Image (tube, rainbow, N blue to C red):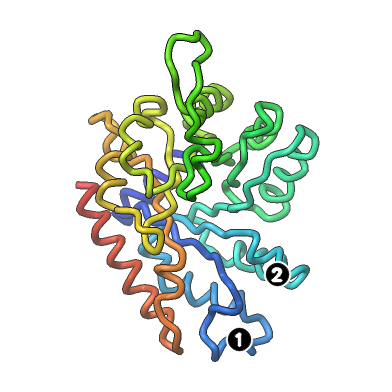
Amino acid sequence: MTRKQLIQQIQLKKSYLCVGLDTDIAKIPKHLQSHPDAVFEFNKQIIDATQDLCVAYKINTAFYEAMGLKGWEAMEKTVNYIPKDQFIIADAKRGDIGNTSSQYAKAFFETMNFDAITVAPYMGEDSVKPFLEFENKWAIVLGLTSNAGSKDFEQLKFADTNNNATEFLYETVLKKVSSWGNINNLMFVIGATKASDLEDIRKIIPDHFLLVPGVGFQGGSLEEVSKYGMIKDTSATAQCGLLVNASRAIIYAGEKEDFAREAREIAQQYQSEMAGYLK
């Protein structure tokens, strides 16, 4: 999916909601747990209930990999079922030496047909570049994450390249990585619980799309994320520049047979709030 197509979907649906399909078979409604294809059936009903309210789906691959071959099959079927006007993200956090990253890119972009994959930048440029070599595909690089452990490395300060001042490691990552690609193939993960930092982050990467997890159960504020995280250039307001992910708050909203209806109600609340911020 191109940047233009993604922006068009945001404008059409008045939404920048990304629904996270972090499907744990132990947490889906009990009446589905004995289904022969339980994970896919659950995902299918969630997608049917929310597809007009969101512009993206994020599949956390760990929940599928943990199930072995059956999980990979459920993931592939889910990707194929998601409507083509949706931006489909593999939340796989890959990143390895160049030839290994190339194989990861082929696996998720060609074999599985995802639009984007989350990437860890720790190993440097040659580990990220292979994900940027596919037309109309995206690398979503970890920037400032919402977990408590982000303080261990991401939020350490050190002298910048000119030894003039100090900056956070994540700021160095944003500056460096943004030069490896462009706004048409590169996004960054910025946790919603770090909303107070978004204003400064936008000074470093003013035009890149941001994938923002952490709204919902993790306590992030959609209002603050929207206020500080949207693209600030008034001529580009309609671009929005955000994909705000909600996973558990939506997919596990209900525990009974009407779980998909309850998921839709929560997704609709997000979409309605987002429509207000897009005006």
**Callout 2 environment at 10 Å: few (<14), some (14 to 19), or many (20+)?**
some
Measuring from the top left, give residue 215's x and y in whole percent: 37, 56
The reply, left or right, for residue 122 in relation to residue 185 is right
The residue that appears at 62% across and 34% down in the rendered structure is: 121
The residue that appears at 58% across and 45% down in the rendered structure is: 118
Residue 52 higher or lower than 146, as above or below: below
The reply, left or right, for residue 63 in relation to residue 50 is right
Measuring from the top left, give residue 267's x and y in whole percent: 35, 67
Q: Amino acid at mark 1?
A: Gln
Q: Which mark is residue 33?
A: 1
Alpha carbon distance from label 1 to label 2: 14 Å
Residue topped by disc 2: 71
Q: Count every numbered label the image shows and give the total.
A: 2
Element carrying mark 2: helix
Measuring from the top left, give residue 15's x and y in whole percent: 32, 54
Based on the displayed image, in which of its 4 quarters is residue 88 positioned? bottom right
Please tell me which residue lies in front, 102 or 134: 102
